[in-house]
Amino acid sequence: MFDFAIIGGGIAGTSAAARLSHLGGVILLESEASLAYHASGRSAALFERNYGKPPVIALNMASLEYHRDANGGVLSPRGLMLVGSAELEDRYTADLTRMSLTPITVEEARSFIPILDPSVVDRAAYDAEAWDIDTDRLVQNFAKETRANGGEVRTKSEVTAIRRTPSGWALTLKDGTEIEARNLVNAAGAWVDVVAEMAGIAPLGFTPLRRSMARLPAPAGLDVSSWPMVFGPGEDWYAKPDAGALIVSPGEEDPSTPHDAFADDMVLAEGLARYEEFVTEPVTRLLANWAGLRTFSPDRNLVLGPSPHDAHFIWCAGQGGYGFQSAPAASQLLADLIAGKQPDLDAETVSALDPRRFERQ
């Protein structure tokens, strides 16, 4: 019998497995053929410490040192820019305040991204303290740590049934294998409420939200490798260099069901049109497109810790768009709570992430 069975092999599950492998025997179960296949494998992969609600920002801050230093670090310089126009002044100002960015001139902005249209962009802000995250390396580092501590990482292991037992949980896999564990960790991303219902635990009302992406050839054949990530006002589009190309997203949050998501052509076209309004180079072709599901709890904060209805059912859910940047601190908090150790995070943040907050409402 394992001490912890973790359902979900994205960044939430792999980071939780690594931390919990120091507390007991762990098995990580991923239904797909590889780890980080769904939302985690389709992330924009940026570390921006001021991105998210206050509890998320606290997790980001607490994760920076790990991202920077652990196993040689997973960060590389990128930078973050916000651009605006007179027409969308209110949205721009709200983003500027929320993300604590420093205003720069339009000329400075165009020195970073020369395709910005000066007839439209009349304001900009920048933060150099934003970094690319090597997401694959981070996931594999956590998986390696799990294995080094004797844990198991299994792909192609879809859980089809969950049964409560006197000693814990019995999980039935699609191939008929049965796994027993004292504790069940629900890190199933868009499927977390589905897993909860399978286990007889009331779902919390998580909502998967689709976000589409398009990969474009580098505009005008320019070298985009040093360009910062750039957001339009209200985050109704963003663009980021990626492997010599440019990825552009409409930034949509369309409610969805848990599934292998794909881009909506009309939403993608509308988002690319919004991006084109701010640049001098039109979009002439796409190299690829895809979508991912960013799953949020009702209050858009992560849910970390044991269920108030069963202490052996543990939530690690609601990472939304913050999973990678918050993973080191979120997984450490989860382990501290299970071990009965005083978390390093402040009490207000811990309370804001506690599953019991939904009972208090």
Image (spheres, helix red, strand yellow):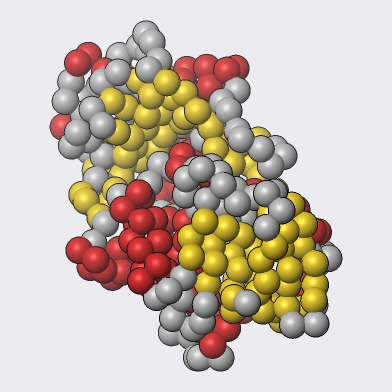
Q: Residue furthest top?
A: 284
x, y percent for residue 84: 39, 34
Apparent side of residue 159 relative to residue 143 in the rendered image (left or right): right
Q: Nearer the viewer, residue 127 or 138?
A: 138
Decide if residue 3 is in sight here: yes
Q: Residue furthest front?
A: 176
Apparent side of residue 161 relative to residue 146 in the rendered image (left or right): right
42 relative to 219, above or below: below
Q: How many marks?
A: 0
Q: Residue at x 52, y 56 (%)?
A: 154
Q: Residue at x 54, y 38 (%)?
A: 292
Apparent side of residue 193 relative to residue 88 in the rendered image (left or right): right
Q: Quadrant of the N terminus?
A: bottom right
Within the image, what quadrant is residue 168 found in? bottom right
Q: Residue at x 42, y 69 (%)?
A: 146
x, y percent for residue 344: 43, 84
x, y percent for residue 283: 37, 13
x, y percent for residue 159: 69, 54
Q: Quadrant of the C terminus?
A: bottom right
46 relative to 28, above or below: above
Within the image, what quadrant is residue 66 found in? bottom left
